[in-house]
Amino acid sequence: MKSILPLLCLLIAQFTYAQNISVTELGRYTDGRDGACEISAYDSTTNQLIITNAASDSIDMVDISNPSMPMHMGGIDVTLYGGGVNSVVNLNNGYFAAAIEAVVKQDSGKVVFFDQTGAYVNEVTVGHLPDMLTVTKDGNKVLVACEGEPNDAYTIDPEGSIVIIDISGGVAAVNTSHVKFLTFTDAPTTIAGSIQKPGTTLAEDLEPEYIAVNQTSTLAAVACQENNVLILVDLTADTILTYKGLGFKDHSVVGNGFDATNTDGIINILTQNVKGVYQPDAIAAYSVGGMTYFVSANEGDGRDYGGYSSETRIKNLTLDSMAFPTANILQGDNFLGRLKTFTADVIGDTDGDGDVDELYSYGARSFSIWDETGNLIWDSGDAIEQYIAANHPAFFNCNDGLASKMDNRSDDKGPEPEAVAIGKIGNRFYAFIGLERQGGIMVYDVTNPNSPIFEAFINNFDATSGTMTDIAPEGLVFVPAAESHNGKNMLIVSNEVSGTTTIYEIVDLLSSVMVSAIDAKGSVYPNPTSNELTIEMDSYNKEVQYYLTNTVGQQIEQGVFMGTTTLSLGNLSTGMYYVTIQDATNPSSVWTTKVVKN
């Protein structure tokens, strides 16, 4: 029995960190300058990363043949083509594309094509401020979100657009005839559940931020962050299907609480009479059962320019006395007074009398899943803030990766979920959610879009020093094992503030035997179960030890059997558990599976 305990302790430690997956850091590329690592693309044929570098206005080429020793192999000076690079994407055909803004952001930008060595191939003119680009799954089209951001004085506000570039004939052959602009002149006058700057048309006001494409390359969703709008695009006809306002999150509902102030010096997650405006930054798509789902990182973003700002704080609003009879208390700094909100001319004055009847805040401090028509399927509620509060309180809602700035962002947008990527391992889908201000990556199993399961939190918080190595994840790329040069599932994270790009290996523990010495994998049934659970080791004619644990590694039951045994789960709460099987005479032989008690 003593020989089993060390390995059991190892398993418990592992499950405290991750339920179904294990995460191993393979290596890190470090530039170290703020903005040096923002968006990455991966090329398996050259074993390299292509990284946007705003610190030097370049695109860096980094060899990761050995992920533990990334090597900078050269770069591209993007000032030869414009004012700065905002996004890159590998086209998987020997080329990659870059979204390059004009020297004056309000002018038309470019998409420039390069070969794998970084040599210039071709370019086309696109819309104002191309902020993000992606390629369809079939490799035939490059889609560009052109934000159309105003100048600081807000005297010039170019229209945003979505640009579709047909590359099916090869990037060298692309010209203006292969470029289609989708503008918003046909947009309705107003969109329910959206945010609009007063005195503007939607064509002027909509600012595309991010694009996700479905698996069949027939549908795209375009997030307009500041507007809280999702634009759905038919990629067969290359036309806009609909404009969908994402609506608002009710923070008064239990499970939707948040910490609203940075002045009390404590963690205080409460429900509030406030509505969150989702305003997603990154979005990603995946398909289950023939249906497309979009996952959004609900960061939130205001308009704050020299010539116009939609941002204020709740203490600066004039609140309706009927709706808020205790406004003098509510607007105190230790309550809601410090919370960033919208000016009354944008939203909140429901009866037009000049005072505010409803309170709104930027972002939803969560990630959400939407169906292919833009309807909300699921939201993570206050789970992100609750998890950090329980497990990493020294860094709760911190800024710049510093424990000394704990609680600093509570009055703004909290942990600020910004980046998202979807990875499929075996038959499971995982969502990776990057927290820009908080730091770290939340991992959820989203195989069932209606009921995601928390899996892990990837981070390098150092409570002793009060710092973290990787700060402000901006871009995430998931590389499945079948498409990686090393045969491993890789998550590549570009961290803007720390100027680092970190490479992780992701392993689905339940898709394989943890240690392969058990040569006859067992069966656990029925699963899910409401009462009895049978463990059958098939033809494994040796005595085995079993452990039943919960999701945080606490042991519930253990025993020894050979062949078949039955466990009674009738007295357990509904939820998820783990059965670990270990060869009683060879403790290096282990197999683990998940069990659902209903």
Image (cartoon, rainbow, N blue to C red):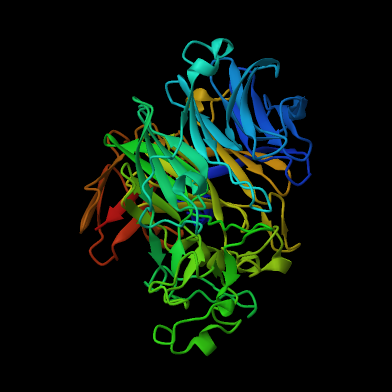
Residue 210 rendering spot, x and y as whole percentages: 51, 41
Picture residue at 63% right of the left edge, 46% below the top:
156
Q: Residue at x 52, y 53 (%)?
A: 226
Reply above or below: 206 against 322: above
Is residue 591 visible in the rendered structure shown here?
no
Q: Is residue 305 left or right of residue 196?
A: right
| Residue 33 % position (x, y) | 79, 44
Say which quarter of the image contains residue 265: bottom right
Q: Is residue 529 above or below residue 258?
A: above
Q: In which quadrant of the rendered image does the C terminus lie?
A: bottom left
The number of callouts visible is 0
The picture places residue 170, in percent across and down from the top left corner, at 52, 11
Q: Residue shown at 65%/64% (left/top)?
A: 398
Q: Residue at x 61, y 38 (%)?
A: 129
Q: Nearer the viewer, residue 489 or 198?
A: 198
* Any part of residue 291 in sight: yes
* Whole-percent x, y for residue 595 in the image: 31, 51
User: Height in image: 324 above or below 521?
Assistant: below
Relative to 470, residue 501 above or below: above
